[in-house]
Amino acid sequence: MLDDFMVRAALAGVGVAIAAAPLGCFVVWRRMAYFGDATAHAAILGVALSLAFSMSIFVGALTIALLMALTVSVLSGRGYAMDTLLGVLAHSALAFGLVAVSFIQGVRIDLMAYLFGDILAVSVGDLGVIWAGAGLVVALIGWRWAALLTSTLNEDLAHASGINPKREQLVLTFALAITVAVAIKVVGVLLIAAMLIIPAAAARPLSRTPEGMAIAAAIIGTVSAIVGLRAAFVFDTPAAPTIVCVAALTFLTTSLIKGVSTAR
């Protein structure tokens, strides 16, 4: 079954959707959209370092994404506005990564594949990495769900409950770095944030509980991946951007449904 490239692509898309769903909900709740985007941009520098030192792309992207997220966490609140700090670090890391790639001799790299994804070229080995990463993210978020939710809702309540909000922020940071590392092959650096945010935002009008929103986001992400791949095959369009377009149309649909129900 895995010999079929479309089957591998679909399984890769579903794996990324499952990893991104619960994490994307916290990104939406905490208004961390730009934070996720900055971490994803930094992954290009990880790709360059991986190629330079002949190591796994996953390891390089994970290391740089994690360092980026930790740097933002350390520098935030030290005289820098968060949006300014994220903008400087995100675009600087992306630029340094692109420049570093140009210095690597004897290696041919398709930058478009890393910027916009190459889901149709996913191998069986890539599938193993994606699903292992997705499993780790889901397990981590599930383990810390109550603490993460409490610290997201109210930091004072978290302190009163014996929960350290900064520790929970680090948990989200680590989960985000893993998601970026596993998703870079599928949707690329520039579209990772879209797969984090759009399914979660689309699920919000349909949900009554946080758990329901995470499940709905996973379903929307999964359906977007499968329908997007089919649409890309039929209309001969780029696969990863088509997946994001389907997710965006789903967001538009759920928003209209919410608007109509509210008007009544």
Image (cartoon, helix red, strand yellow):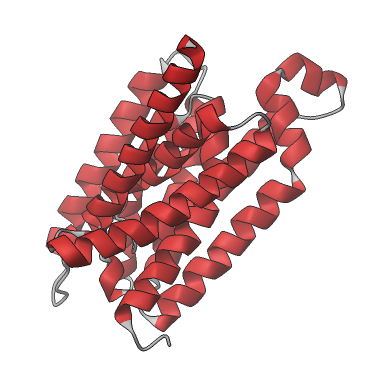
Judging depth in this view, the residue of 25 and 249 nearest the camera is: 249
Residue 57 versus residue 18 in the image, above or below: below
Q: Which residue lies furthest to the right in this view?
A: 161
Answer yes or no: is residue 86 visible. yes
Residue 14 versus residue 108 in the image, above or below: above
Judging depth in this view, the residue of 20 and 260 nearest the camera is: 260
Describe residue 114's horizontal placement relative to residue 26 as left or right: left
User: Which quadrant of the rendered structure holds the N terminus?
Assistant: bottom left
Judging depth in this view, the residue of 250 and 27 nearest the camera is: 250
Question: Which residue appears at 22% of the width and 47% of the height?
Answer: 96
Describe residue 206's horizontal placement relative to residue 229 as left or right: right
Number of numbered tags placed on the structure image: 0
Describe residue 48's horizontal placement relative to residue 178 as left or right: left
Residue 66 position, x and y percent, is 49, 48
Question: Which residue appears at 20% of the width and 43% of the height?
Answer: 95
Residue 186 position, x and y percent, is 34, 62
Question: Which residue appears at 65% of the width and 28% of the height?
Answer: 208
